[in-house]
Image: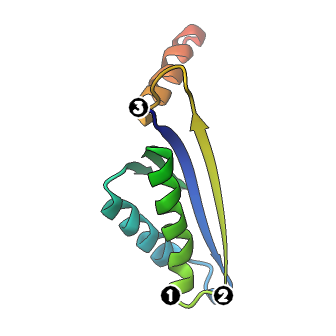
Amino acid sequence: MAGVVAEIAVVPLGTGSPSVSRYVAECVRLLAASGLKYEVTAMGTIVEGELEKVLAVARQMHEAPFAAGVARVVTTIKIDERRDKALSIRGKVAAVTGQLKNFGV
């Protein structure tokens, strides 16, 4: 089963506050309910799964701030898909960590 690794960042605008963590938390709640593997980072959330499922949950995440009364939302999605071998969040991190050893890091 081929999958993708994606980064999703949902940014609600015009909330009346510089803090958007409550909106982000609702997006992560939706993601957790999807059953997909994910990791929350400081600037976005990394998601692993089948492309169709990732895109479906990205749409739900994008819509969540609107449902909470926000008038404008900017969502950025980056998708990494390989068709020559399986991708995973852990595998991508391990590949970079392995290369860092070549630099003595």
Residue beneath the point at 31% across and 55% down? 35
Mark sitting on residue 90: 3
Residue identifier under label 2:
71
User: Is 38 rendered above or below residue 80?
Assistant: below
Determine whether, in the image, residue 95 is placed left or right of residue 18.
Answer: left
Residues tagged 2 and 1 counted as in contact (Cβ below 8 A): no
Q: As drawn, is 31 to the left or to the right of 11?
A: left
Residue shown at 57% from the left, 34% from the top: 81
Q: Amino acid at mark 3?
A: Arg
x, y percentage for residue 91? 43, 26
Q: Is residue 35 visible?
A: yes
Closest to the observer, 71 or 104: 71
Relative to 90, does residue 15 appear above or below in the rendering?
below
Between the C-alphas of marks 2 and 1, the distance is 9 Å
Judge the density around disc 2: few (<14), some (14-19), many (≥20) Cα neighbours within 10 Å: few
Viewer-side residue, 81 vs 24: 81
Decide which of tag 3 and tag 1 comes sooner along the chain: 1
Could you tell me residue 105's position as x and y percent? 54, 17
The answer to which of 44 and 67 lies nearer the viewer is: 67
Residue type (three-letter) at the residue carrying disc 1: Ala
Dot 3 crowding, Cα within 10 Å, few <14, some 14–19, many 20+: few
- Visible in this render: residue 41? no
Query: At 55% across and 15% down in the image, what residue appears?
Result: 99
Is the C-beta separation of discs 3 and 1 under 8 Å?
Answer: no
SS at badge 1: loop
5 is higher (above) or lower (below) than 20: above
Disc nearer the start of the sequence (2/3): 2
Spatial distance from mark 3 to mark 1, Cα to Cα? 33 Å
- Under mark 2, the amino acid is Ala
Residue found 56% across the figure and 28% down from its top: 82
The residue lying furthest to the top in this view is 102
Q: Which residue is mark 1?
A: 68
